[in-house]
Image: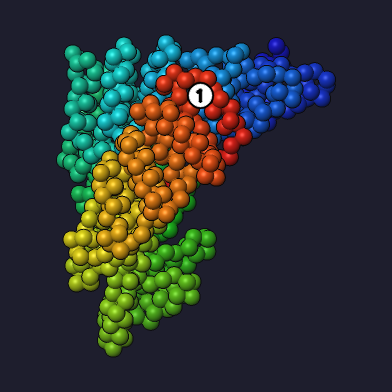
């Protein structure tokens, strides 16, 4: 008892190493640590982020004469949640359910639900909530909140609202966390009006949804307005927030900076940093980035303020990244301080931060604005020596430097070279934006090249589609693909695959299937990714018949389904409870030499449990114990 209390106390203060050391010392002294000691040591490791160590302790229990009890399983599941290992957490739950000596209680389920929600697996978490109800286990508001928040992060507003309605039907009271997650979900789905209506209900005492808003509530509502371009509403929400006696936090100021940036009010964005300091709000990296973004968007920034911002960030413990350094170089260039801009470029490299093509373009432009074409040429040479490929922005900056320096022949030669490269330089720039997560900048470049009469080619649109997909802007990715057809540009297979994925992720499975079917007409042969993206779209829509049909078509086309293909089809069976079809797919995999993975077994076991085939579900869970980690969409 004393050892357990000691380990528990060490865990509460974050001393996980000492907690494990106490456990090891007991064994050294010939004292067998109790299961409770192991549980407390596991919790100490888990809460300190040492989830792998916690699972190692769990695995060691049998070798020390302990059969893990429900509490130890719960601690192991919590560790899985900390490590984003939701599949392992779900497998442990299946072990508990399959055991004659153990029972899955509400706490066990809630722990696995939390792990799935944190891992972004909102569908699996939702299924576990419903499974709890079937087993007459009482779900909690906290459990529902976690799943609704996962839906919000995935942009699944409709699913979040369905879960909130389930809470109402079960008599679970929605709290402010519930409503904040719903507001975030609505904002991410660009449903600003619905978000504002929900906030109004929260503020209305007579409403069924009456809950006192907190700062996060207003932040979510403001974020919804910014995403929808309703910038005027942001100021009104800030006033309501203050009227409610709530102080803006770093998140609030970040959202305000984004709003000011979109409205072109860069001075107001910069002033927010001083306002934050005056209000005693601790500095935040995302606030600094939002202010820099506002200034860059407005193409205005006072040079001295730009340099001081870098110092402030560093002093606050946020070393500026390449984007911030680039923004400062832009500001210095516009202020005519090209020498200082070049010193900033050198300081950036000395600090171990690799300049990007955008950074070099800013430095070349800083020199060019003062007619210092030789300095601009030197920067260009340094850039080429570093292996950085010139894009449209760099060409434009150097051409401008030559022109301002009176070097017309060199400017004309470079202009001819750029126009010869044409779309390729723009394509490289768009791809670079995509790799750095700047999908909006990628689309602006696409607009710019069309405005300059440079016709986009297939790879240009492909880079734009990829940039949107990388940022999970699925609807915009689909729109860019559709723009290709309007321009009469034929897509390549990689772009089509991304478009199929985008259609599926944006809730358009019919369009995903139509594009897959259209590939032969585009003189493209679908590959494994084409089929798997389409299968994923059908699985997400719960369309079992379409999924099974795709598997048949895939085989008929001479393409061998892989584990990802089968996982999608098995998951689709789960939506309709078709346990026999799911097991037939499992048998087909084995016969075809495709090894099922953990996701396959979990999906098949879920179908069986829904159909009341608990013995089959338990058998599948036992089979999965030695399975390797799951694969994603290939």
Percent x, y for residue 116?
A: 45, 30
Front in this rendered view, residue 506 or 564: 564
Front in this rendered view, residue 297 or 114: 114
**Would you name the residue on which mark 1 appears?**
617
Q: Is residue 407 left or right of residue 31?
A: left
Percent x, y for residue 398?
A: 33, 76
Q: Is residue 509 left or right of residue 615?
A: left
Residue 259 seen in this snapshot: yes
Q: Is residue 308 left or right of residue 624?
A: left
Percent x, y for residue 244?
A: 25, 24
Front in this rendered view, residue 546 or 459: 546
Instruction: Work out whether 441 lies above or below 39.
Output: below
Instruction: Work out whether 207 lies above or below 216.
Output: above
**Residue at 23%, 61% in the rendered image:** 484
Question: Which quadrant of the figure has residue 55?
Answer: top right
Residue 279 seen in this snapshot: no
**Residue at 36%, 48% in the rendered image:** 553
- Scheme of image coloration: rainbow
Front in this rendered view, residue 224 or 631: 631
């Amino acid at each position: 008892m004393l050892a357990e209390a000691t380990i528990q106390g060490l865990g509460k203060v974050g001393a996980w190493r000492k907690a494990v050391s106490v456990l090891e010392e007991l064994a050294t002294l010939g004292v067998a640590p109790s299961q409770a000691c192991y549980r407390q040591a596991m919790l100490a490791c888990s809460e300190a982020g040492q989830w792998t160590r916690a699972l190692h302790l769990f695995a060691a229990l049998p070798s020390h004469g302990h059969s893990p009890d429900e509490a130890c399983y719960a601690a192991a599941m919590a560790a899985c949640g900390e490590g984003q290992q939701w599949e392992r957490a779900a497998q442990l739950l299946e072990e508990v359910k399959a055991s004659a000596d153990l029972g899955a209680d509400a706490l066990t389920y809630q722990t696995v639900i939390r792990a799935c929600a944190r891992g972004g697996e909102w569908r699996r978490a939702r299924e576990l909530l419903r499974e709890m109800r079937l087993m007459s286990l009482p779900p909690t508001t906290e459990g529902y909140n976690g799943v609704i928040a996962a839906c919000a992060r995935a942009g699944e507003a409709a699913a979040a609202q369905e879960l909130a309605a389930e809470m109402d039907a079960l008599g679970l009271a929605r709290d402010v966390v519930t409503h904040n997650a719903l507001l975030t979900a609505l904002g991410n789905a660009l449903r600003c009006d619905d978000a504002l209506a929900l906030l109004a209900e929260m503020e209305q005492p007579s409403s069924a949804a009456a809950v006192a808003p907190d700062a996060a509530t207003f932040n979510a509502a403001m974020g919804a307005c910014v995403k929808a371009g309703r910038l005027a509403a942001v100021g009104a929400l800030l006033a309501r927030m203050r009227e409610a006696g709530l102080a803006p936090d770093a998140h609030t100021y970040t959202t305000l900076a984004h709003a000011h940036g979109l409205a072109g009010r860069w001075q107001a964005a910069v002033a927010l940093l001083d306002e934050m300091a005056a209000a005693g709000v601790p500095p935040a990296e995302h606030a600094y980035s939002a202010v820099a973004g506002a200034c860059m968007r407005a193409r205005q920034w006072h040079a001295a303020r730009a340099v001081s911002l870098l110092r402030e960030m560093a002093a606050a413990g946020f070393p500026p990244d390449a984007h911030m350094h680039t923004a400062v170089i832009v500001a210095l260039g516009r202020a005519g301080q090209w020498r200082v801009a070049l010193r900033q470029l050198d300081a950036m490299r000395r600090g171990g931060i690799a300049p990007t093509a955008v950074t070099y373009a800013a430095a070349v432009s800083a020199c060019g604005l003062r007619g210092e074409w030789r300095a601009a040429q030197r920067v260009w040479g340094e850039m080429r020596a570093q292996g950085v490929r010139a894009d449209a922005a760099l060409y434009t900056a150097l051409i401008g430097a030559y022109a301002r320096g009176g070097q017309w022949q060199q400017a004309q030669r470079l202009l001819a070279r750029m126009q010869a490269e044409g779309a390729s330089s723009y394509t490289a720039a768009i791809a670079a934006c995509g790799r750095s997560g700047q999908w909006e900048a990628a689309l602006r470049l696409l607009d710019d090249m069309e405005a300059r009469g440079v016709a986009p080619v297939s790879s240009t649109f492909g880079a734009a589609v990829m940039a949107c997909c990388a940022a999970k802007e699925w609807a915009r990715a689909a729109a860019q693909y559709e723009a290709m057809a309007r321009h009469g540009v034929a897509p390549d297979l990689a772009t089509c695959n991304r478009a199929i994925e985008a259609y599926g992720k944006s809730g358009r499975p019919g369009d995903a299937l139509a594009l897959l079917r259209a590939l032969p007409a585009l003189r493209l042969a679908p590959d494994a990714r084409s089929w798997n993206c389409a299968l994923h779209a059908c699985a997400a829509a719960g369309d079992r018949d379409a999924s099974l049909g795709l598997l048949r078509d895939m085989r008929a086309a001479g393409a061998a389904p892989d584990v990802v293909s089968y996982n999608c089809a098995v998951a689709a069976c789960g939506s309709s409870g078709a346990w026999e079809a799911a097991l037939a797919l499992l048998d087909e995999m084995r016969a075809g030499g495709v090894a099922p993975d953990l996701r396959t077994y979990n999906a098949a076991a879920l179908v069986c449990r829904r159909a009341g085939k608990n013995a089959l579900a338990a058998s599948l869970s036992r089979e999965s114990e030695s399975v390797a980690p799951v694969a994603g969409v290939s």
